[in-house]
Every structure is written in C-alpha cells, then in structure tokens.
Amino acid sequence: MTYLGIDIGTSEVKAILLDDAQAILATSGVTLRVASPHPGWSEQNPEDWWHATLDVIAAIRAAQPVAFSGLRGIGLSGQMHGATLLDKQQHVLRAAILWNDTRAFAECVELEALVPESRAITGNQAMPGFTAPKLLWLQKYEPALFRATAKVLLPKDYVALRLTGEFVTDMSDASGTLWLDVAKRDWSDRMLAATGLSREHMPRLVEGSAPAAQVRPALCAEWGISHPVLLAGGAGDNAAAAVGLGVVEPGAGLLSLGTSGVLFAGSDGFAPNPGQGVHAFCHCLPGRWHQMSVILSAAASLSWVAQLTQSTDIGELVAQAANVEARKAPLFLPYLSGERTPHNDANARGVFFGLASDHGRAELAYSVMEGVAFAMADGNEALRSAGTHLSQASFVGGGSRSRFWAQLCASASGMTVLRHDHGAAGGTMGAARLAQMAVTGRPPVEVCTRPPVAEAIAPQADSVLADRLARYRRLYPLLREEFAAAAEAAR
C-alpha cells in the first residue's frame, strides 16, 4: 500500500508518496501566487489550490505509476486560518482571505468585547490572521457576501471537499479559527454566535489521524485506481510538520522557517498563555495539544530581499550573507506583514536600522536572516513565560536547508537545532503519516518516529550577537507608536 501526503502551502502545493515502510517514492511541487489588492491584504483563489493539487498528483502518478496504483490513503496539511467562503451550491464566493492578512485588526478588539471569555475558550488572543475576525470584517464591508455564506472552510478543507464531496476538518486546523473550544475539542456555540454563525456553517470535526471521508470514485477511476481511497482528517501545516518529524510527545520541539516562522512545543494538556501572543492549539493526534509562537514573515523575508536585490540564486545569496561581519550589518525587524508573537501588532512593519552607503546585498541578506533568528528568540522567550522550556528543536521548512541560518537560530534562542535529512518535507511527510494511521489503525508511537539527526547545532556564545539582540529588542517599543501613526495615515 502507498500513502499520499499533500501540503496546501502559501507559496507552493507539495506532495509526497510513501510506502508502508515510509520510504519516499516520489515528490512534486507547484508554485502558488498571493494577491495583495490593498496594503495589508493577502488573498488567494481557492481554485488555484485545487488545480495545483491535481497537478502534483499527476506528477506523482507519472513518476511512480505502479506504486501510485496501490494508493490507499491521502492526508492533507495546509496553511491555517484562511477564510474560504462557499454558498449553498458550494460555489466559492470570493478570494480566500489568508493567515497573513491584517485587515481585521479592529474586529479583534470587537470580538473580545463581545465574548470577554474568548481567551479562556479558545486559548488564544484574537489576532487579525485568525478566521473569526475576518468574518466580522465581512459582515461590515461585504454584507451581501456574508449573507450568502453557507460554509466557511480552511484551505486544506476546501481541497478535501473537492476530493471527497464532504465538509470536514481536523482539530489542529480548527484551533486556528477562534471558533473552537480547544480544551473540549468541539465547536464553541458562543464564539460562533458572536460572528453571526452557527455549527451549520462549520465542517464536521475529526481527529487528524482518523478516517474522514472516501475520495470520490470518479477521481479514483480517473487515476486508474479501482479500490477505495481514504482521506484522513489531516492537520494544520505546523502540526503536520511535527508529525512528520516525530514531534508528538510533551516537551518535543519544532522550529519551522517557511513563509512564516514557528516555534512549536508539544504538550499533553491545554496550556494557554494568550497574553504573550502564544498560541495554544489541539495537536492533530487524539488527546494531545501544543503551543506555538509565530512570526508572520520568515523565509518570506529572505525571498523579499532576494527579489529586492535582484538575486536569482538564493543559495548564493545565503553563502554571501554567511561571510558578512555581523557588527557591520544593519539590524532588521522582520515585520513585513505585521507581527504575532510577542507583539500582536498588525501595524508593525519591516525596518532596516543602521543602513549605510557601503551596505550591499550580502549585508541586507545577513540582516534579514539574523532578524528572523532574533524574532524566533523572542518566540522562545514567550514560550518560556508560559512555562514551556525547550532545550532543542527539529528544524523544518525551506529555511532548514541553510546550516548558517540554523546556527543563527541556535545561538540567538539558546536551543540546540536539529537538522534532519528530510526536514524540508516535514508537512507532506506528516500528512502521509496521518493517512497511514487512518488506513491501518496503527498508533502514533509506531508511525510517528523521529528521523535520524543529520546534525545537532548547539548554541555558540557570541557577545556581538548578544549585543545586537538586545538592541533589536529595544527598537520595537521605540517604534510602536510610529507604526500605529503610519498605519492611520495610510488609511
């Protein structure tokens, strides 16, 4: 039997095919684009996710036709929080509003005023990237579309609908909506009512490793498969990456540098700390939860500076950055899309501090990579304030390809960073593992094993880096009011 893991990312849809022994048989990826029709807005067309999914499946099938014919299960992971609106005929009403969209910042205040106990229910501070505030925004500014909305789906769950014809989501992804009672692992009628919705607007809830639905027979026939194919509950992208790297037990950690940056810590109970911008979510496995600190622009910041400096080879740019003398580089605040942990400030924006005429692309790239590492260090401090202490974390995401970035993150945060051979494939691997558990009924302890550690990168004492981190942390409080004033002037 084989299992397909598909990750509906922000910049790419990726897929991986595994056999029963979890050997990787084939991989594929299709690039996506993000639209920003107004400052602070971030949107994608859900049809682009679906067409990219069909394309990656076709590529996997072409690469491994015999193995693909033995497909028994599909698992989906995906970017979280995106509001995908459907009418009663299951037609998409508008472009999906994504996780890094900041338009609903005022609605966050409104939502917490409507439900004073919202943080206790959801385990999280209301932030504009979450799904519920987006629906309050739609009520105000697109009321006709809001009235026509019959279902609200997350990105991976729209793909699940196209695959199976059923509305279904998992606990980890649902945790990021602000509609889930995270301790009870059930929809909160109180939170739904505050946004003018009910359970009828929501998909069915399942655990990520549980059977969720059957793939449409017509699709199976199109793929040349005559037997049923099961869809697992799936997971939000970070929970899936954790499963892919075996980060499923309490105290296990994950450091992800994808489009966003995440520090993930597994737990065996619901342990919220919303005051510091720490997320408390359900894990995608039964009876498990996790905490996360999140920054909105990690590898996306490096892609931005590469484009800005017309650097076509990011690997070469990173190599140039590694040779920069840190004390001579500017500081960078990586708040290109606002920020979550620890500031929860939709108005925050990126800053180069200390630019000089002799700075070039190498210095800018170094500053961006260092700034992201410093932001991850802030996230680690937020987790520590919640009582979670990570001594090490597995490195995952596109940024995990860089050993230099791993060393910056380790030294800034004080954690040992573990690199794995397939770290960049964590989300798709996790989705495929969820499919395997759903099909076979095997327990997580057997399926979610830790891959071999290719390299453990310990923090290094570096007085220059420590001084720069302290200066970095002084900059945001000095600029907070200016960020707010600039945002107000731009409206």
Image (cartoon, helix red, strand yellow):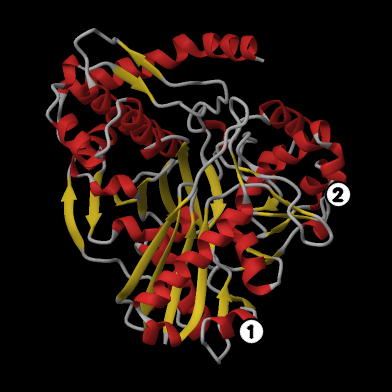
Q: CA distance from mark 1 to mark 2?
A: 30 Å
Quarter of the image for the C terminus: give it: top right
Tell me if 342 is positioned left or right of 363 in this view. Answer: right
Residue type, label 1: Pro
Q: Nearer the viewer, residue 314 or 429?
A: 314
Q: Position of residue 398 (x, y in %)?
A: 33, 48
Q: Position of residue 473 (x, y in %)?
A: 37, 19
Indicate which disc, 1 or 2, sits on the residue closer to the N terminus: 2
Answer whether labels 1 and 2 touch (C-beta < 8 Å): no
Image quadrant where residue 15 sits: bottom left
Does the image show residue 472? yes
| Residue under pointer 2 | 148
Residue at 56% x, 44% y: name it. Answer: 272
| Residue under pointer 1 | 217
Label 1: which secondary element: helix
Residue at 31% x, 27% y: name it. Answer: 368
Q: Is residue 397 above or below residue 22?
A: above
Mark 1 nearby-residue class (10 Å; few <14, some 14–19, many ≥20): some
